[in-house]
Amino acid sequence: MRAAAVDWRLAAPLGIVYLALFAAPLLLLLGISLHVDQDLQQWGLDNWTKFWGDAFYRGVVWDTLRLGVAAVLATSLFAWPLAVFFCNASPRTQKILIFIILLPLLTSVVIRTFAWIVILAREGLVNQVVLSLGLSATPLRLLQTETGLILALMQIEMPLMLLPLISVMRGLDPNLLDASRALGAGMWRGFFRVILPLSLPGWIAGATLVFASACTAFISQSVIGGARLVYLPSLIWQQAMVVYDWPFAAVCSVTLLLTVLAGIMMLNWLGRYARTD
Amino acid sequence: MASRRLFLAGMAGALAAPSIARASGPMTAAIYPGTWDEAYREVVAPLLRQRHNVNVAFEPLFAVDQVAKVRAARGVAPFDCFVLDPGPAAAARQAGLFEPIDPKLITNAGKLPDGMLIADSATVNVQVVGICYNPKKFPEPPKSWADLFRSPYVERLGLTGFQTTFGTVSLIEMAKVFGGSITNVEPIFAKLREVLPKVAAVSTPAALPGLFQQGQIDIMYTNTNNAATLKARGVDIAFVAPSEGAITFATTLHIVKGAENKANAHRYIDVALSADAQSKLQLSPFNMIPVNKDVQLTPNLDIKSLDELSKMVTHDWNVINPRRAAWIDRFNREITK
């Protein structure tokens, strides 16, 4: 009982800071979204019905969540093999690998994003290679497509997936894989039956980070995706900063928050199954 | 106990720090990020210190962000001076965010063309908007707004919407070419629908120069500043005024309602208007078209004299502002894949 009281007081400073700087603004945001007019005088649900009653805006929500899922799938596809390779590499190689993995985190998001313009543009790196190899007669359209955006997000978000995955896989008992091999499982079977289930908690942590970060990657979405791909973050910016329709921008913001949160909670829910094996 | 006192002292220090930083610069001016920020730090700030012993602190914010910030502050001026484009300026005026400017305190008032210094606004620079193209790819430049929508130009065109001043006024002029007007932009939307599958890119305004530099697009509509900046970096780019006439609009300085340092704000505006400042601001890499009649225009500006401005196209933003939200929304819907 006494211990519990001390615990409460230890957590209080951070709790109060969170309450003041996190919960209060969120409530404010929710309050703004429940107004009808731009001067925030009249209460009402009009902006909520405007948003959800419109197929265009529902489409924007759907596209945003789909982008997050696509980024998770793309990073997973490359992160698992890379993590397996990492765990079996010599300490020296591991050091080099960790540097390469962390590299995207060490450069500013703006620079990373503009670097992808140089790579994906009509006269960019990829197209120069494709054209010189004769794989295509005309430059491929990569910039301002969803494929290009997912490709860029995959590199930008990769460390968020790899680091939790590696930290979990490093803790795995190497004997388990040996045992599966001794019992006749091949490489693929060993991966799917042993490594994959055991590393799932790491993947869930990584997937949560990648999903949330890809759904809200304002700069990458607007610079690489271009204006023809409309996602919630750019819609929020436009409504708040260009159109000045704060209630509607608040509706978009709360929607983004809740939908991304729903995705994260689903991953968490998945995590409960992963841990009770 | 001592540590708690230390902690409290630290907290007090942390809370006091912003106000100390604010007091040390006897004024704060909002400034556009990028070129404007660099230019005003390098040219205007030293002149202001030298002439009036005023230290100006700059707060880099886009026009819409400045207005949003002052509106959000609800009466407590977060900075002393705005720098705005006509759209946000009209909105800010309507919201009553300006303090009057006393013309007696502006010694350079007589050096400006008529109408550039009014009750609450001082034009500090004009922008000229037209067509930019890559002369290596197109020896024969597009001649009119309508040409942008014809082959071979349309396939290399970078489009941008109604989010920026230059984007909005350009699209209005294109609408006019196809039979529309400032209140009826329907024709340009019809045209956009038709050419969307063909255009090289539809982009956010900030990404356009990068796309041009990387060869993703070879034609865009933008201001002469952007053209001159890219040219100075070695990009193949040339500016051409469309046959319908180039567009011009003013960038204006204003004093924020309830500003803490009104006297210094007047000094700041006066220095920015002075021939000394303006003759430096027109040079590369800033390329700002001056408004002070004593300044000799340099060739990088793509205009020969201030008299040309009177022949260019201008727009009434009190007409545009109420319609713009709907246009932006419409643009979103129609261009989305």
Image (tube, coloured by chain):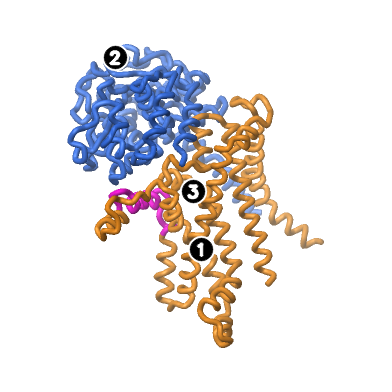
Chain colours: A orange, B blue
Kindly indicate whether the residue at mark 3 contacts the one at mark 1 (C-beta within 8 angstroms).
no
Give the label on residue B113, or none.
2
Q: Which residues are magenta?
A: A104-124
Label 3: state its secondary structure. loop
Q: Residue furthest bottom?
A: A182
Residue nearer the viewer, B268 or B236: B236
Whole-percent x, y for residue B276 in the image: 25, 25
- Of the numbered discs 1 and 3, the one sitting upstream in the chain is 1
Compute the Cα span from label 1 to label 2. 63 Å
Compute the Cα span from label 1 to label 3. 18 Å
Q: Chain of mark 2?
A: B
Q: Chain of mark 1?
A: A
Q: Is residue B285 left or right of residue A48?
A: left
Three-letter amino acid code at the position of disc 1? Ser
Give the label on residue A76, or none.
1
Three-letter amino acid code at the position of disc 3? Ala
Q: Answer yes or no: are tags 1 and 3 on the same subunit.
A: yes
Compute the Cα span from label 3 to label 2. 46 Å
Q: Is residue B108 magenta?
A: no
Three-letter amino acid code at the position of disc 2? Pro
Visible in this render: residue B30? no
The C terminus of chain A lies in which quarter of the figure? bottom right
Residue nearer the viewer, A1 or B328: B328
Residue on which the image places disc 3:
A217
Instruction: Name the residue rendered at 62%, 25% in the picture.
Output: A37
Label 1: state its secondary structure. helix
Instruction: Name the residue rendered at 68%, 64% in the picture.
Output: A272
Q: Is residue B187 above or below residue B227?
A: above
**Of tags 3 and 2, which is closer to the observer?**
3
Q: Is residue A136 left or right of residue B21?
A: left
